[in-house]
Image (cartoon, helix red, strand yellow):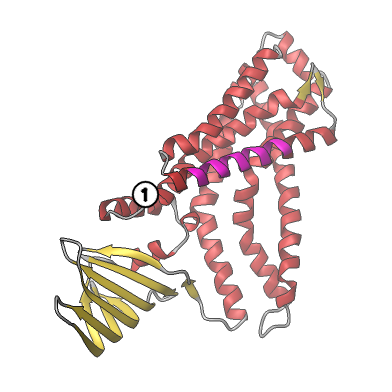
Amino acid sequence: MNILGHYLGRELLWGVGMTLASLVAIAYFVTFAGEMDHIGTHDFTAETAVLYVMLKMPKIVHEMFPVSILIGGLFSFGGLAATNELTIMRATGASMLGLLWQLRKVGLLLIVVAVVNMEWAVPLAERGAKVVKTTALHQSLVEYSDAFWLRDGDHFVRMEHVESDGSVAGVQWMKILQHGELSEVSFADRATHKDGVWNMEQIRVSRIGRQQVTAEQHQQLDHQSTISRDFVRLASRDPEDLSTGDLLQYSRFLEKSGLDSNRYWHTFWSRIAAPFGLVVMMVMALPFSVSEGRSLSAGRRIVTGVFIGVGFYLINKVLMNTGEIYQFNPVVTVFIVPILFFLSALWMIRRRGL
């Protein structure tokens, strides 16, 4: 990176940093205000609320990062245009695309920061925030409370509540024969996993024969299973809370089991597309930071940045949800909007002669 690249990179990092700090500060106070109702309940104090909101910051940073790059880029490029520095740079023979190429190392740095935050900081901090809040409010730490289905050989298993220790409250499993007939339905109040075996407690078993249905009850039963405790934790969590590696592993498992994996594949590919989305935000900032050769005012830069950022997010979200519902190819679904915005930015740069 030459002197020009260092200068442009410093300006961009300053703009992105200031924008991100401002947005995170606003989000901090909004989140803190939302927790004020809990202050005074059991052991939930103002200090607990501050700690809880601090632990929510990595996720907020993750959500604010793309729009921060866009608005920060608008301020950086707009400031250079306002002082005619962009004009001077172009007079030396540098095109706008060439100037963007000078920022490749800064762009790579921003991508690395975003990925590290998304893959490591967010999961750890979210887990810590949940522990802090539930402990202070004297609540049971439930890992996940929505029921989900898994397949274990010829059994389809429904689990209701996954506790923090990996045990499951409320288990139902159904045995399906090869020709599709239901042969057995069992319910257990609780299940714990150890050494590849699920120990079931308070079990009710209904065996369905051709002529009759027989019922049994047991205090305890061991059930051999290919489903591990760690895999149950993967299955029980929202796709957005999983790392990219876990998403890939679980998506393949669902696909192999013949279960619907579309939502997880869409989330996985959206993670892969996320770095490209950051590049798109940086490129989009250039043509919108100047208007007919003149810089935009600070107010117009903010409005423009918010408008583009919200538009990008909403279109992407709608297309993602549509793709999940109608089983579209996840690669096409997650990449089409960033590619269209990227090509639009290049077209605008060329059209304006930048």
Question: Mostly what secondary structure, the magenta segment?
Answer: helix
- Residue 53 shown left or right of residue 78 in the figure: left
Residue found 58% across the figure and 36% down from its top = 278
Q: In this view, does 73 lie above or below 327?
A: above
Near-viewer residue (298 or 86): 298
Quadrant containing the C terminus is: top right
In magenta segment, residue 313: yes
Q: Is residue 7 visible?
A: no
272 versus 182 height, above or below? above
User: Percent x, y for residue 222?
Assistant: 22, 81
Q: Is residue 220 above or below residue 245?
A: below
Specify the quadrant of the image occupied by residue 89. Answer: top right
Residue drawn at (62%, 43%) of the image: 314
Report which quarter residue 299 is drawn in.
Answer: top right
Viewed as shown, does residue 133 lie left or right of 47?
left
Of residues 99 and 231, the one nearer the viewer is: 231
Q: Name the residue under label 1.
A: 248
**Looking at the image, which residue is at 27% across and 81% down?**
199
User: Is disc 1 surrounded by few (<14), some (14 to 19) or many (20+) residues within 10 Å?
Assistant: some
Q: What stretch is highlighted in magenta?
A: 307-322
Coordinates of residue 258 in the picture (x, y in percent): 28, 53
**Viewport quadrant of the N terminus:** top right
Q: Hey, what amino acid is under mark 1?
A: Leu
Q: Residue visible at 37% across and 72% down?
A: 159
Kind of element beneath mark 1:
helix
Q: Position of residue 170 (x, y in %)?
A: 38, 79
